[in-house]
Amino acid sequence: MRVEVWVDVLCPWGYIGKRRLERALARFDRRAEVEIVWRSLELDPGSPRFPGGPIADLLVEYGVYENRSAALRQFEMIGYLGQQEGLELHLATALPANSFDAHRLLQLAVERGLGDAMIERLLRGYLTENIDVADHAALVPLGREVGLDTAEMWSVLDSDAYAGSVLADRDLARERGVLGSPTFVVGGHAAPLGAPSVDTLLELLGQPVG
């Protein structure tokens, strides 16, 4: 059974959703049959290479929130939900970042059998440690921690390697009607956009909850 997860490394709901998926799988009777496929989905493909001001200000500018206070209240609520999953999220101090190269590194890790560890490290790096995931010098140590080769990572980041894989995931998302991060798809059936409950994920996997 294949579970495909479209996620951006900048997305706190993606991190919360990953934890809920892990809890669902721990209760799933056929866990050994499940293959998790991490797919790249950029929330803002056109974002600048270098970070600007606080992300709350950018979201206000984009019209996501009415004002900065509303954004910070939402961050506080998401942080509380993260705490329920054992996560420490520092959203108010995160700076906007272009995640394309982080996704190229994720695609390398997936090819090396390290996709789960890499997406975990990228999510924690950005959402907890507020690392600039567009900075190659910041990305390489994260990859090294999960077992990627330093020279190979620099070779990838200094080229356009795996760009095609990231773009292919973007195209596949459009084809399947995937609209945001995270989206969980099992057998062509997608869970509601966002971080579904553990019970919802179990039902998507085909295990009745009662």
Image (cartoon, grey):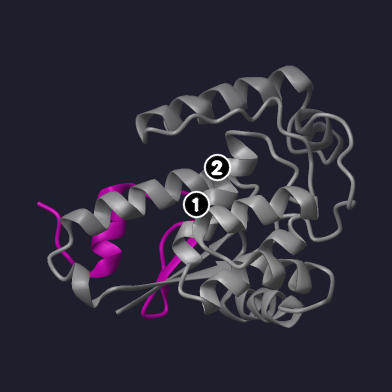
Q: Is residue 68 left or right of residue 172?
A: right
Q: Is residue 40 visible?
A: no
* Neighbourhood count class around disc 1 (C-alpha, 10 Å): few under 14, some 14–19, many 20 upward: some
Query: Which x, y percent locates residue 96?
Result: 79, 41
Q: Which residues are magenta?
A: 182-210
| Residue found at the very far left of the displayed protein | 210
Query: Which x, y percent locates residue 100?
Result: 76, 62
Q: Quadrant of residue 42?
A: bottom right
Query: Regarding mark 2 in the picture, which secondary structure is present there?
Result: helix
Type of amino acid under label 2: Arg
Residue at the image point whose x is 86% and y is 35% from the top: 61
Q: Is residue 199 left or right of residue 171?
A: left
Spatial separation of the CA atoms under disc 2 and disc 1 = 6 Å
- Verify whether residue 187 appears in magenta: yes
Residue at the image point whose x is 54% and y is 53% from the top: 145
Which residue is disc 2 drawn over? 124
- Verify whether residue 191 appears in magenta: yes
Query: Which x, y percent locates residue 136?
Result: 78, 55
Which residue is disc 1 drawn over? 120
**What is the number of the mark on residue 67?**
none
